[in-house]
Every structure is written in structure tokens, then in C-alpha cells.
Image (cartoon, helix red, strand yellow):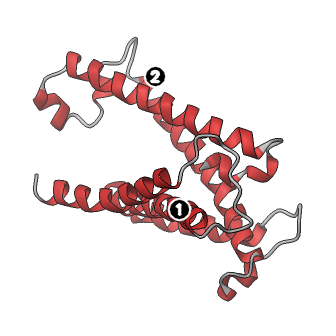
């Protein structure tokens, strides 16, 4: 979604977004699968369940490398959200979809200062809670619902044969969008069952 949030800055969005999205997804999936194998080989089941910073425990040459990585990764993700979310909010406001968002409208090429301030206040509110474990499931659900909305929009635009909807990606099919939307809607229920009834 980072590429989609900055699609106005891309030279060729029709080509760059699918390639970038698939490359990021495949790379991330490969890294997660590799980490599952490596951590399974390095530690016991008990350590996997109890040591929240197992990565730092087994890090070479020192755990400080992991702590620095966590800080930099967190700052990178925060900056990405603080630059992408306000532009998305301003774009929705400019489309006049929700009248309550009219305050966040901006002209073409102008930075969305009001939307950035609003986004920063939401972020500060979440940080003030003080326990990220309390808000992580909620944020995850919001992201999944956002992805479900994007997939459902693609499915409906394809199904209704909207004249403005002309995907140029050769592997696009409406069924992929429907499956993506169903997975995004179904995953929270599966996660809730897993968390509440281990």
C-alpha cells in the first residue's frame, strides 16, 4: 500500500505498483518463511513461546544490532504512515465522498498540513496508551479491513464493468480480488478464535 499511497509520485503507476507490490510481498514471504525455519532450528518450543526478543537473544555479534534494527524499522514505518496516510486522507476529501472530511481538502501539489496534523494526533493518542500489545490487534484489523476494501472495490469495479476501470496488468482477474477480500475479512475472525481459544 505504500506505493499506492504515493502513486502520484510514480513515473508509470500502471507498471510500478503491480511489480513493486508483488516483489515486496514475495520478498517478505520468503524472509518470514526463512525466519520460521531458522528460529525453529535455533530454539526450543518453550523459548519460542516465552522469549519475546528471541531475535536479540540469538543475535550475532551482539543483541544491540537487533535493538537498533527495531528502532530504525519502527521509525521507518512511522514516517511512511505519516507521509502516506495524510495524502490518502486529502485525496478522499478532494473526491467529496464524505462531507465531514472537507476540512482536509488541498489543492494539487500542496502539502496536506491539516491531514498530517490529524494523523499525527491519532498516532500520539495510540502511543500515549503506553502498551502496544493493547492496540496491535486493533491496528491489524484496520489494515485488514483497508485491504479488504481495496480488494472489494477492484472486484466490484470489474463485476460492474465500470468504464473508468481498465486494469492493464495481464494477470488481473476479478476472482483474485474476491479471494483477497474474503481472506482479509475472514482472517480477523480466525485470529480472534486463535487468541481467545488457544
Residue at image x 46%, y 53%? 175
| SS under mark 1 | helix
In this picture, residue 39 sits left or right of residue 174: left
Is disc 1 surrounded by few (<14), some (14 to 19) or many (20+) residues within 10 Å?
A: many
User: In the image, is 30 to the left or to the right of 157?
Assistant: left
Nearer mark to the viewer, of 2 and 1: 1
Q: Which residue is mark 1?
A: 155
| SS at badge 2 | helix
Residue 140 in view, yes or no: yes
Give the alpha-carbon distance from disc 2 to disc 1, as whole Å.
43 Å
Q: Report the disc number at residue 107.
A: none
Viewer-proximal residue, 21 or 156?
156
Observer able to see residue 134? no
Say which quarter of the image contains residue 137.
bottom left
Where is residue 31 drawn, in percent x and y? 42, 26
Observer-nearest of 115 and 179: 179
Q: Is residue 62 above or below residue 3?
A: above
Q: Where is mark 2, residue-wise?
A: 65
Residue drawn at x 30%, y 33% is: 53
- 92 over 18 or under it: above or below: below
- The quarter of the picture where residue 16 lies is top right
Q: Nearer the viewer, residue 94 or 170?
A: 170
Determine the residue positioned at 69% across, 61% down. Answer: 165
Q: Nearer the viewer, residue 96 or 81?
A: 96
N-terminal label among 2 and 1: 2
Above or below, 93 relative to 171: below
Q: Position of residue 93 (x, y in %)?
A: 72, 76
- Whole-percent x and y of residue 9? 81, 48
Q: Are marks 2 and 1 in contact (CB under 8 Å)?
A: no
State the residue lying farthest toward the top: 61
Amino acid at each position: 500500500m505504500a506505493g499506492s499511497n504515493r502513486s502520484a509520485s510514480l513515473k508509470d503507476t500502471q507498471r510500478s505498483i503491480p511489480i513493486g507490490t508483488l516483489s515486496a510481498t514475495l520478498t517478505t514471504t520468503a524472509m518470514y518463511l526463512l525466519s520460521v525455519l531458522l528460529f525453529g532450528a535455533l530454539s526450543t518450543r518453550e523459548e519460542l513461546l516465552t522469549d519475546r526478543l528471541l531475535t536479540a537473544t540469538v543475535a550475532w555479534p551482539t543483541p544491540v544490532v537487533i535493538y537498533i534494527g527495531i528502532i530504525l524499522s519502527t521509525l521507518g514505518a512511522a514516517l511512511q504512515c505519516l507521509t502516506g496516510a495524510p495524502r490518502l486522507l486529502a485525496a478522499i476529501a478532494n473526491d467529496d465522498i464524505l462531507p465531514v472530511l472537507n476540512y482536509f481538502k488541498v489543492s494539487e501539489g500542496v502539502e496536506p498540513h491539516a491531514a498530517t496534523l490529524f494523523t499525527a494526533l491519532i498516532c500520539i493518542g495510540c502511543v500515549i496508551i503506553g502498551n502496544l500489545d493493547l492496540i496491535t490487534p486493533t491496528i491489524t484489523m484496520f489494515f485488514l479491513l483497508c485491504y479488504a476494501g481495496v480488494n472489494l472495490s477492484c472486484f466490484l469495479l470489474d463485476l460492474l464493468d465500470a468504464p473508468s476501470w481498465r486494469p492493464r496488468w495481464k494477470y488481473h482477474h476479478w476472482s483474485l480480488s474476491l479471494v483477497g477480500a474474503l481472506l482479509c475479512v475472514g482472517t480477523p475472525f480466525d485470529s480472534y478464535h486463535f487468541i481467545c481459544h488457544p
